[in-house]
């Protein structure tokens, strides 16, 4: 109630100051001498004054400046009695203890993830064997009936399809090994990955056979490692490229209330043993130089960094003091997001990103968020339209609202 009365008084003071400049002393004196006959009249007049203030951009701007300069959260604590402050401090200490318990909870969740990763791995190994063509799945394993396929195909269409299959069977049908370009197709389809993908990366990623997530061992600092397994190729000698993400699950000593769960704090890549002339992370440029004295011209070649997905394995190093410029912070944050996306989405649901079904789910989720945002915007627009209508009714000629007539007792 005190805050409400103070805010209304502020509206009134600012309005009077703007409507009655100090130079117009007679008008100001006349308004100050006005007394309302009844309490009801006073309430009505205050309401009209408030409406007039809300319609005055200068008054609103001045009021906003005053409100912005007022203390917010801390003022609540400052205005409390000492005894109550002590109790609030006790609650904050309890909150810190709660944050530490929450950190332990996430550590156990990490251990649970590590445990179940071992159960998932045989399934992922079988997936790799099928993708690479090392194993041919049985007829039973290949049976997959979509929910609506039977409804869409009539008996006539089924018969026609059977005849076509027989004709195709007579011809020498191409039977590629495994599922060609499985991971490359995923890279092309997912926006977050396709943004990093360059044309010269694609022939290399055709040799990518599997991506694994390896969790840190028990009692070791929390982390996870992405392993990219490649078949023998003409680009580099490595068979596995790794990216390790170090994590922290403990409240910050200086700001314990900001803790919201484990966070990635650093990452380490690996050295790629490129074969001669195959390093796509650099490019060779030629530049002509002219000697100032003799005037002779020579051609100089040098290597400069080149955009490539494989820069992913050479991340920005976080210094001991943790200070980075704005661009580096953004690059590192993006790197962390990509690593988390590989771990949580790409590796567990690879086939659905290959077929595009997971992309449809992601888009549906984004559309739902967008629809909610649009509804909020429409509500705000409707409120603004209502305000405009009220302004038009109170002041149809576009002039300033007329002050309420004052009567003396």
Image (spheres, rainbow, N blue to C red):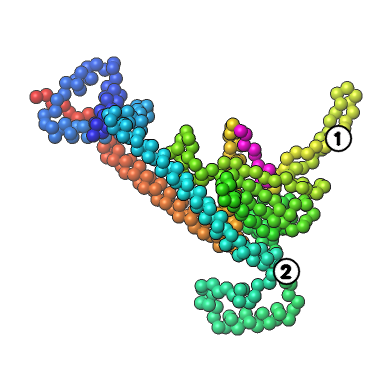
Measured as percent of width and height from the top left, residue 224 is found at 60, 50
**Chain part drawn in magenta:** 311-320
Q: Residue extending furthest left?
A: 409
> Residue 408, labelled with which disc?
none
Q: Quadrant of the C terminus?
A: top left
Q: Quadrant of the N terminus?
A: top left
- Which of disc 2 and disc 1 is earlier in sequence? 2
On screen, residue 107 above or below 127: above
Helix, strand or loop for the magenta stretch, by majority: loop
Residue hosting label 1: 299
Residue 322 visible at all? yes
User: Where is 229 relative to 21, above or below?
Assistant: below
Mark 2 neighbour class, 10 Å CA radius: few under 14, some 14 to 19, many 20 or more? few
Q: Is residue 228 left or right of residue 223?
A: right
Residue located 48% across and 56% down the image: 365
Question: What residue appears at the point 38 percent right and 37 percent down from the top-left corner?
Answer: 93
Residue position for label 2: 176
Q: Is residue 61 visible?
A: no
To which quarter of the image does residue 141 belong?
bottom right
Report whether 162 appears left or right of 150: right
Percent position of residue 218, x then y? 57, 51
Q: Where does the image place residue 329, in percent across and percent down from the top left?
A: 58, 37
Give the answer, above or below, for where 1 lies relative to 345: above
For the point 24% across and 31% down, the residue is: 2
Q: Quadrant of residue 9?
A: top left
> The residue tagged with tag 2: helix, strand or loop?
loop
Task: Answer whether residue 228 is magenta in the image.
Answer: no
| The one of 53 and 130 positioned closer to us in this rendering | 130
């Amino acid at each position: 109630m005190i805050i409400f009365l103070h805010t209304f008084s502020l509206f009134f003071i600012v309005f009077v100051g703007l409507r009655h400049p100090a130079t117009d002393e007679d008008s100001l004196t006349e308004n100050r001498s006005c007394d309302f006959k009844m309490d009801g009249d006073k309430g009505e007049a205050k309401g009209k004054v408030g409406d007039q203030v809300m319609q005055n951009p200068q008054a609103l701007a001045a009021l906003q400046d005053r409100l912005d300069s007022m203390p917010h959260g801390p003022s609540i604590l400052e205005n409390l009695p000492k005894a109550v402050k002590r109790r609030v401090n006790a609650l904050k200490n309890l909150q810190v203890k709660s944050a530490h318990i929450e950190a332990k909870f996430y550590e156990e969740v990490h251990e649970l993830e590590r445990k179940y990763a071992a159960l998932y791995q045989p399934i992922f190994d079988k997936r790799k064997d099928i993708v690479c063509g090392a194993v041919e799945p049985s007829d039973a394993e290949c049976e997959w009936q979509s929910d609506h396929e039977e409804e869409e195909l009539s008996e006539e269409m089924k018969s026609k399809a059977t005849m076509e299959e027989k004709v195709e069977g007579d011809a020498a049908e191409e039977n590629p090994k495994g599922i060609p370009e499985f991971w490359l197709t995923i890279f092309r389809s997912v926006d977050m990955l396709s943004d990093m993908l360059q044309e010269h990366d694609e022939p290399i990623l055709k040799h990518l056979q599997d991506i694994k997530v390896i969790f840190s061992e028990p009692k070791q600092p929390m982390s996870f490692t992405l392993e990219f397994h490649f078949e023998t190729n003409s680009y580099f000698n490595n068979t596995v490229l790794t990216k390790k993400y170090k994590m922290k699950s403990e409240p910050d000593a200086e700001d314990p209330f900001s803790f919201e769960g484990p966070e990635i704090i650093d990452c380490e890549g690996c050295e790629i043993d490129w074969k001669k002339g195959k390093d796509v992370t650099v490019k060779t440029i030629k530049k002509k130089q002219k000697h100032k004295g003799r005037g002779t011209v020579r051609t100089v070649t040098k290597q400069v960094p080149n955009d490539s997905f494989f820069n992913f394995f050479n991340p920005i190093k976080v210094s001991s003091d943790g200070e980075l410029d704005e661009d580096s912070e953004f690059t590192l944050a993006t790197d962390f997001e990509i690593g988390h996306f590989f771990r949580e989405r790409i590796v567990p649901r690879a086939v659905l990103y290959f077929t595009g079904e997971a992309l449809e789910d992601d888009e549906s989720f984004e559309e739902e968020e967008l629809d909610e945002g649009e509804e909020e915007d429409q509500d705000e627009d409707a409120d603004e339209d209502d305000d405009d209508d009220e302004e038009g009714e109170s002041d149809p000629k576009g002039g300033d609202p007329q002050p309420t007539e004052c009567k003396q007792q």
